Image (cartoon, rainbow, N blue to C red):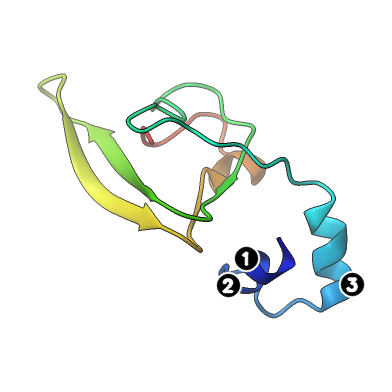
């Protein structure tokens, strides 16, 4: 897990001791293909570090539709705004 954290923006400059402390807070989770990790507008209290696979980032439109605005891959993070005071999710993952 430490090797993954070293690839993640925001963690890559931390020393191994600090990364080890962070690693102890992580809970590995596997999601089935096409499962929604979170929904725009819901309360957010988790951040996701992507080890492998891809996650589409979707935004709601005025027509009650969704458009893909980004695709996240291994080494990317998502949902971090929930840890920094953002009360609701700003996109669907």
Q: Residue 12 location in percent, x, y?
A: 65, 76
Considering the image in quadrants, where does the N terminus appear? bottom right
The x, y position of residue 37, in whole percent, is 46, 30
8 versus 50 height, above or below:
below
Tell me the number on the disc at residue 76. none
| Residue at 73% from the left image edge and 67% from the top image edge | 2
Q: Position of residue 78 (x, y in %)?
A: 49, 48
Tell me whether circle 3 and circle 1 mark residues in contact (CB < 8 Å).
Answer: no
Tell me if 38 is positioned left or right of 34 in this view. right
- Of the residues under marks 3 and 1, which one precedes in the sequence? 1
Asked if marks 2 and 1 touch (Cβ < 8 Å), the reply is yes
The answer to whether mark 3 and mark 2 are in CB contact below 8 A is: no
Q: CA distance from mark 3 to mark 2?
A: 16 Å
Q: In the rendered image, which residue does mark 2 sit on?
A: 7
Nearer the observer, 37 or 30: 30
Q: CA distance from mark 2 to mark 1?
A: 5 Å
Please tell me in which quadrant of the rendered image residue 29 appears. top right
Please determine whether, in this image, residue 68 is positioned above or below residue 15: above
Residue behind mark 1: 4
The residue indicated by pointer 3 is 17
Which residue is pictured at 58% across the width and 72% down the height? 7
User: Residue 27 occupies which quadrant of the picture?
Assistant: top right
- Please state if 93 lies on the left or on the right of 58 as rendered: right
Q: Earlier in the sequence, mark 3 or mark 2?
A: 2
Judged from the image, the secondary structure of the residue bearing numbered disc 3 is helix
Is the residue marked by circle 3 packed among few (<14), some (14-19), or many (20+) residues within 10 Å?
few
Return the residue found at the far left.
63
Give the image quarter of residue 59: top left
Which quadrant is home to the C terminus? Answer: top left
Q: Is 78 drawn above or below residue 21 in the view shown?
A: above
Q: Position of residue 56 (x, y in %)?
A: 30, 43
Mark 2 closeness class: few <14, some 14–19, many ≥20 residues within 10 Å: some
């Amino acid at each position: 897990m430490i090797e993954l954290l070293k690839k993640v923006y925001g963690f890559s400059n931390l020393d191994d001791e600090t990364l080890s402390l962070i690693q102890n807070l992580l809970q590995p989770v596997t999601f089935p293909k096409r499962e929604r990790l979170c929904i725009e507008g819901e309360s957010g209290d988790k951040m996701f570090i992507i080890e492998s696979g891809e996650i589409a980032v979707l935004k709601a439109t005025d027509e009650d539709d969704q458009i893909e605005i980004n695709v996240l891959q291994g080494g990317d993070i998502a949902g971090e705004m929930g840890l920094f005071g953002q009360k609701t999710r700003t996109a669907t993952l």
